[in-house]
Image (cartoon, helix red, strand yellow):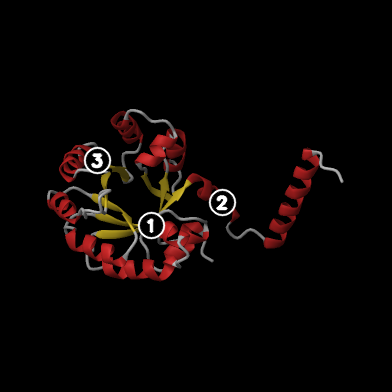
Amino acid sequence: MKRVNDLNVKIFADGADKTGMLEMNAKPYIKGLTTNPTLMKKVGIKDYEAFAKDILSSVTEKPVSFEVFSDDLAEMERQALKIATWGENVYVKIPVTNTQSVPTYSLVKKLADKGVKVNVTAIMTLTQVRDVVLSLNPDVASYVSVFAGRIADTGIDPVPLMSAAVQLTSMNSKAEVIWASPRELLNIFQADEIGCQVITVTNDILKKLELVDYDLTSYSLDTVKMFYKDAVEAGFSL
């Protein structure tokens, strides 16, 4: 197994907690950051623009993705153009459809042709990957964000699909595939093996990086000690 520093896949920290985001930004192996409205709601953010600009005042070099939150394509466009002005390192997340299943490919094309760096998100099928890639501008950097973790939640092995997504996206040299919503640390190494360019990882999974190459016999003993300690502290008796 490769060490973290030897990986080709770029690890992006996924979150909305300012302290956690800045902590991850300071780590050299974190190459970018992403967030979304759901994560922001969970931590109680009320002012979207103020939060984004606060983060961008500290994260000035690495790419950061912020998402539009309208269901109307015209309003999505307005929000996207505004978000894009917040920094050269900003990517605008556009959902692959709105809530009525209306594809956003035309909007993606319009934005990309205006030079907006887009991160097309919530993708789960190869048809979506293909149509997104065909909508992107080959001269403008972009991300194709495929939710491998959610695909796995349905019982489908995401690796073959992600591998095919990487091949499809190679039609556009400026587009990179994101392995989104990973469920375990192993996904980082799986993404690297298939040539996926980026993986977004939450802080709880990133904390497990210290376990890479950890001796399994020692890990087994640690687990036994944990069970024993918790039973004692709980005061269990039979």
**Proximity of marks 2 and 1: CB atoms separated by less than 8 Å:** no
- Disc 3 target residue: 70
Mark 3 or 2, nearer chain start: 3
Give the x, y percent position of residue 138.
Answer: 17, 60
Above or below: residue 86 compared with residue 98 = above
Q: Nearer the viewer, mark 3 or mark 1?
A: 3
Give the x, y percent position of residue 84.
Answer: 21, 41
Q: Separation of disc 2 and disc 1 at Cα?
A: 21 Å
- Looking at numbered disc 2 in the image, what kind of residue is underneath it? Lys
What count of labels does the image hold? 3
* Badge 1: residue crowd in 10 Å (few <14, some 14–19, many ≥20): many
Q: Name the residue at 31% across, 43% down.
A: 61
- Disc 2 target residue: 208
- Disc 1 target residue: 147
Quarter of the figure with residue 164? bottom left
Residue 114 appears left or right of 51: left
